[in-house]
Amino acid sequence: MKKIICILFFIPQMLAAQNVNYDEARIPAYTLPDILTGIDNKKITSAAQWEANRPALVRLFAENVYGITPEIKSRVKYKIIETNNNALGGKAIRKQVLITFEDFPQLNGINLLLYIPKHIRKPSVFIGLNFEGNHSLGNDPDVLITQNWMVDFQKNPEHIFKNRATLASRGKAVVETWPAETIISKGFAMATAYYGDIEPDHAEGWKAGLRGCLNKTEETEWSAMGAWAWQLSRMLDYLETDNDVNSKKAIVIGHSRLGKAAFWAAAQDQRFAAFISNESGEGGAALKRRWYGETHEIINKNFPHWFSGKYKTYAGSIDALPFDQHQLFGLIAPRAVYVSSAEGDQWADPNGEFLALKNAEPVFALYGKNGLGVDAQPKVDNPVGSDIRYHYRSGKHHMTAYDWEQYLKFAAEVVNKRK
Ligand code: GTR
């Protein structure tokens, strides 16, 4: 398993090896745009002023990076495919909900898998996308196998054959991002869906996905990241109709590319009560201006569909971007946020992830929220912060039991306690 993840992770690094820097001392000096200067160039000194600045800042990120999410008005149907009141050894309620869009019959719809602990009434809920279908996450035999196209992450035809999941791939996810039993035992619900339900993750994938339904060309307003973020909001729409969970306490979480999508979803959609970035790196939690690990040029070369056409025009001139990712964290305030990096994941620029969150502190302070409590990136396995939190884990690019231990603590201490 670990070997597969390493291969996956290192391919793009090998492709672009000549441009990759892992030496902090070689990073050219850069200046971050002042987070407390509004789009109108006026100084921001109150939460109200930050709120007033919010829509224009979201718009700026959309225009330049993630693409503009169009107004999509399609009638939505929720079909509860099945419910089981004795799932996960009798500890959880399981629901599988098919979300379809009347105007886009070409799409199979979003298959939402929901586990709800039985010992808590209306629990907070972790919500996020998964890499290889709901069935790949655990050994629950009744979870439906996704029929949709998927990236051949594993290079193992027993699990993914001709870009489709096989029966044998149940419980065989390349990244075990969702420990359902642990989440349930701590009194939280989880809601997840396969990210390829809305757009297959390849350069031409938009044609078969939601963006294709809208007849937008790839290079126009929005991007695959935008479509996946949209998917997360539609999953939350459903949760708002489900009385068994507390949708006001929805914690959007994502690993790696799915962390980038979750970040953009949380920035745009303030209904998400909290955001957790697990090694989302370039295009996610990491500062763009730092020449360290994956860069703007590399990510756009390897994944041209992830971001908007406009974003590509900053190749070689990233300093010209009128913002950086610390401001995207500012857009999460005053909600709770957790960022995690891993020592064996220098590709994601762990220190750049820390610095982005650190430089967002002034916005959280406007709302009376505490900062990280440290000035420099902490040592490994030493979580810091209270309202906003960060850890630098030992080990590789992954989402581990250690990560979840911190997230569940954070959810109990911060998210559950908020009004
Ligand atoms: C890598 C990519 C990263 C990250 C990762 C993943 O190949 O360079 O930005 O998104 O994939 O999603 O696993």
Image (cartoon, rainbow, N blue to C red):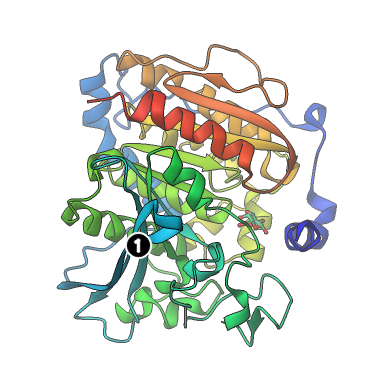
| Residue located at (75% from left, 61% from top) | 1
Percent x, y for residue 142?
43, 73
| Residue located at (74% from left, 76% from top) | 155
Query: Across the whole image, how many numbered discs are drawn on residues?
Result: 1
Return the residue nearer the eye: 228 or 321: 228
* Residue 218 vertical placement versus 363 (above, below): below
Percent x, y for residue 252?
40, 45
State left or right for residue 38 relative to residue 308. left
| Residue located at (35% from left, 62% from top) | 231
* Residue 320 vertical placement versus 414 (above, below): below
Return the residue nearer the eye: 314 or 289: 289
Q: Is residue 380 visible?
A: yes
Question: Where is residue 69, by image quadrant?
Answer: bottom left
User: Which quadrant of the frame does ligand 1 lie within?
Assistant: bottom right
Q: Is residue 131 visible?
A: no
* Residue 379 vertical placement versus 282 (above, below): above
Amino acid type shown at disc 1: Gln
Percent x, y for residue 346?
74, 41
Q: Dot 1: within a 10 Å radius of its alpha carbon, few (fewer than 14), some, or many (20 or more) residues?
A: many
Q: Quadrant of the C terminus?
A: top left
| Residue located at (40% from left, 28% from top) | 412
Give the residue at mark 1. 231
Return the residue nearer the eye: 263 or 383: 383
Percent x, y for residue 415?
35, 30
Secondary structure of the residue carrying tag 1 is helix
State left or right for residue 81 relative to residue 406. left
